[in-house]
Image (cartoon, rainbow, N blue to C red):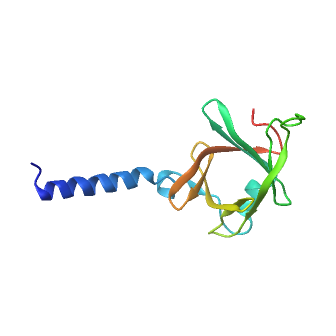
């Protein structure tokens, strides 16, 4: 039988270790926040296609148009499944900069962090909700 003090210790250790493993978006982990004086975040995303690879397939390829339209590349100029607007994007400026994506009635707001590998994580607090996205100049396929 485990003594109460030992079981509490195990629980606390597991809780702290689990929380530490969940923390991704912080300077202490080698990340740099895409924020700062002026429109740093807007400038980083505007005119770029964000690419998110999952396994061997592109989970999404979304272009950040300068007018705030978010455009899904899909299959480019394909007549059946071609590029089309899927929502909007906007970013705040300053040290607390965040990007908000709106798809119909659903909105998602993130802080953006650049990783040591030059990829981008989209985070809510210290938790990466989207990991390892790359940014391409212009509107293009991520392939």
Viewer-proximal residue, 105 or 71?
Answer: 105
- Name the residue: 63% across, 69% down: 95
Viewer-proximal residue, 109 or 81?
Answer: 81
Viewer-proximal residue, 52 or 75?
Answer: 75
User: Left or right of 33: which side holds 9?
Assistant: left
**Percent position (x, y) of residue 37?**
69, 69
Residue 13 to residue 81: above or below: below
User: Left or right of 89: which side holds 31?
Assistant: left
User: Left or right of 53: which side holds 5?
Assistant: left
**Percent position (x, y) of residue 74?**
79, 39
The C terminus sits in image quarter: top right
Residue 143 to residue 89: above or below: above
**Percent position (x, y) of residue 78?**
88, 34
- Name the residue: 33% across, 56% down: 16
Residue 90, quarter of the rendered image: bottom right
**Percent position (x, y) of residue 13?**
27, 54
């Amino acid at each position: 039988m485990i003594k109460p003090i030992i079981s509490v210790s195990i629980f606390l250790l597991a809780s702290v270790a689990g929380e530490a493993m969940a923390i991704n978006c912080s300077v202490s982990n080698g990340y740099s926040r895409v924020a700062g004086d002026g429109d740093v975040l807007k400038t980083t995303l505007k005119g770029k296609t964000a690419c998110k690879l999952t396994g061997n397939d592109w989970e999404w390829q979304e272009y950040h148009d300068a007018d705030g339209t978010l455009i899904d590349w899909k299959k480019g100029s394909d007549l059946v499944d071609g590029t089309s607007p899927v929502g909007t994007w906007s970013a705040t400026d300053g040290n607390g900069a965040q990007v908000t994506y709106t798809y119909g009635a659903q909105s998602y707001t993130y802080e953006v962090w650049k990783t040591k590998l030059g990829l981008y994580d989209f985070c809510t607090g210290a938790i990466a909700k989207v990991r390892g996205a790359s940014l391409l100049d212009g509107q293009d396929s991520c392939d």
